[in-house]
Image: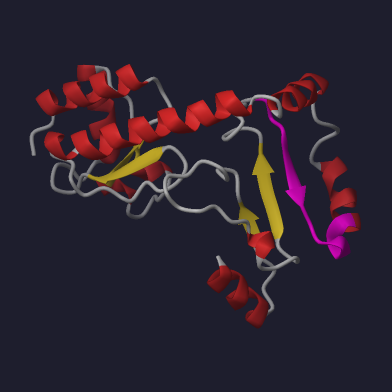
Amino acid sequence: MRALTDYCQAKGIRLISDEIYHGIGFGTPWVSALEFDPNTLVINSFSKYFSMTGWRLGWMIVPPDLVRSIECLAPNLFISAPTLSQHAAVAAFDCHEELAANIQRYARNREVLLNELPKAGLSDLAPADGAFYVYANVAEITNDSVGFCRRMLSEIGVACTPGVDFDPDRGHASIRFSFAGLNEDIVEACRRMKDWIKP
């Protein structure tokens, strides 16, 4: 992060840091870009760490020179955050035990996927140091990630996301697994994939 912020400062680039998964990590210390550059714009949300996906509530941290511009822009994008979402977010600040338990569950699920996916023939995995996803290279199995995901859902009831949803040029050879679910569901999905995927 320091290298990135130093580069942006040296080149006169205003950095916008998407820190929506901040707090969900596995062995890597978390930092904010603000620790290295007070002129960074930080985008965050209650969706991921606070488990409030769909509540449509987040925040921006901006340097003083941009506050007025953003105040003028914001009403053109939305009127206000929903009252119910705001009350829920205030309550979420008192849920640290539950949120910490979520991170522990994610860590267990992550380990299951990292250990079991290679046994199913998916051994080329991107490091999953943060968030709750594992990316797998499926180039040796298929060149059609969309079709592969459809077949897997239809034939064994396991859902994953085709890589083209994230990279239309190279995503045809990758898929993304979420490990935000229940541990028993992750274990069962891996069992089904081992019987289904033919490397």
The quadrant in which the N terminus is found is: bottom right
Residue for point 42% across, 32% down? 106
Residue for point 27% across, 39% down? 145
Where are the magenta residues, as a range?
55-67
The quadrant in which the C terminus is found is: top left
Q: Is residue 39 above or below residue 165?
A: below
Total marks placed:
0
Left or right of residue 31: residue 119: left
Residue sitting at the far left = 198
Residue for point 45% across, 46% down? 130
Left or right of residue 110: residue 38: right
Residue for point 13% across, 31% down? 197
Quarter-of-image position of residue 174: top left
The answer, for residue 53, to whether it is visible in the render is: no
Coloration mode: secondary structure
Q: Position of residue 180 (x, y in %)?
A: 43, 28
Residue 124 included in the magenta stretch of the image: no
The answer, for residue 122, to whether it is visible in the render is: yes
In the image, 130 versus 53, the foreground residue is 130
Left or right of residue 187: residue 25: right
Quarter-of-image position of residue 6: bottom right
Q: Position of residue 165 (x, y in %)?
A: 41, 42
Left or right of residue 65: residue 35: left
Q: Position of residue 185 (x, y in %)?
A: 32, 18
Q: Is residue 84 above or below residue 68?
A: above
Residue sitting at the far bottom = 10
Q: Is residue 199 above or below residue 66?
A: above
Q: Position of residue 154 (x, y in %)?
A: 25, 18
Residue sitting at the far front = 97
In the image, 24 versus 150, the foreground residue is 24
